[in-house]
Amino acid sequence: MNEQNKNDRAAWLKGPPAECSVSETRSPWRLVLLGAPGVGKGTQADLLHERLGACHLSTGDVFRAAGSRDACEQTPAMRTAIEYMCRGALIPDTTVWEMVRERSACIRCGGGFILDGFPRTVSQAEALRGYMEGESLLLSAVVNYELPLAEIVTRLSGRRTCEECKSVFHMTMQPPREQGVCDHCGGRLFQREDDRPESISVRLEAYERSTAPLIQFYSELGLLVPVAATGSPDEICGNTMTALEALASPG
Ligand code: AMP
């Protein structure tokens, strides 16, 4: 990977006018990660970033960062978006696209990108496609992480996140050394509001209704790369790399 690209996501997380230090690479990877909530897209995006250099761009991270700001710093559209997120419901397409469009420098970035959690509806996918066509950019691939429903529920309900460094643990599958405390920075671990049981069913229903159709959308475009989301995170990442290496050269 390009040593200079350190997943500097200032421009993504803060929006303009923030700038980051990412530099152009010769054949940037432009990836979309698909899969139900809880399959581990965020973990895979971080691991893929280490191997491919492209930045991990999560729309959920942007909305969560906005949610942790003071209410008076939030726009009315953002306040409404945060309410949707807390219920586990999808944020309306226009709000999501406005937020991504504002950060379109990250889509044009010569270091590439790994989109996690976007697009989540066919209308978002069409907006992204239209934008990329206008900029003469092509997606390299769309990785679809597959996992049985029962395992998804187990993963989501046991997930805990560090308040400080955002590292993710699992109560039984990847427990921290000390209960409730982050191994990396000592921060407090918490359960995301949308990982509570009442939100999980809303999120899974939203996935089935709105996001699963993207599998066909990208399959018809010849971009879909299915990968089983079973095994350790490193194994899954290895399988993803093998599948990506089998594709024609990226870019
Ligand atoms: P995630 O971290 O990707 O699971 O996203 C957390 C929550 O943010 C989702 O449950 C939605 O409420 C909201 N969200 C994130 N990305 C999108 C998107 N592309 N479209 C609609 N809602 C989104």
Image (cartoon, rainbow, N blue to C red):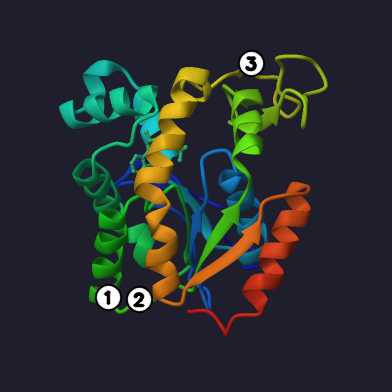
**Which image quadrant is residue 205 in?**
top left
Which numbered disc flags the more N-terminal residue, 3 or 2? 2
> Label 1: few (<14), some or many (≥20) within 10 Å?
few
Q: Given contact means CB atoms under 8 Å apart, are the residues at marks 1 and 3 in contact? A: no
Residue type at mark 2? Leu
Residue type at mark 1? Glu
Residue 115 position, x and y percent, is 46, 55
- Mark 1 lies on a secondary structure that is helix
- Whole-number angstrom distance, CA of label 1 to CA of label 2: 6 Å
**Is 71 positioned to the left or the right of 206 in the image?**
left
Q: Which residue is mark 2?
A: 137
Q: Is residue 109 visible?
A: no
- Whole-number angstrom distance, CA of label 1 to CA of label 3: 43 Å
**Is 130 positioned to the left or the right of 67 in the image?**
left
Please tell me whether residue 116 is drawn above or below residue 48 in the rendered image. above
Question: Which residue reaches farthest right?
Answer: 177
- Mark 2 lies on a secondary structure that is loop
- The residue positioned 44% from the left and 23% from the top of the image is 199
Question: Which residue reaches farthest left?
Answer: 76
Q: Given contact means CB atoms under 8 Å apart, are the residues at marks 1 and 2 in contact? A: yes
- The residue positioned 19% from the left and 28% from the top of the image is 75
Please tell me whether residue 234 is drawn above or below residue 196 in the rendered image. below
Q: Which residue is mark 3?
A: 188
Which numbered disc flags the more N-terminal residue, 1 or 3? 1
* Numbered tag placed on residue 133 in the rendering: 1
Q: Quadrant of the N terminus?
A: bottom right
Residue 221 position, x and y percent, is 39, 75
- Whole-number angstrom distance, CA of label 3 to CA of label 2: 41 Å
Please tell me whether residue 62 is drawn above or below residue 138 in the rendered image. above
Q: Is residue 46 visible?
A: yes
**Is 13 positioned to the left or the right of 91 in the image?**
right
Residue type at mark 3? Arg
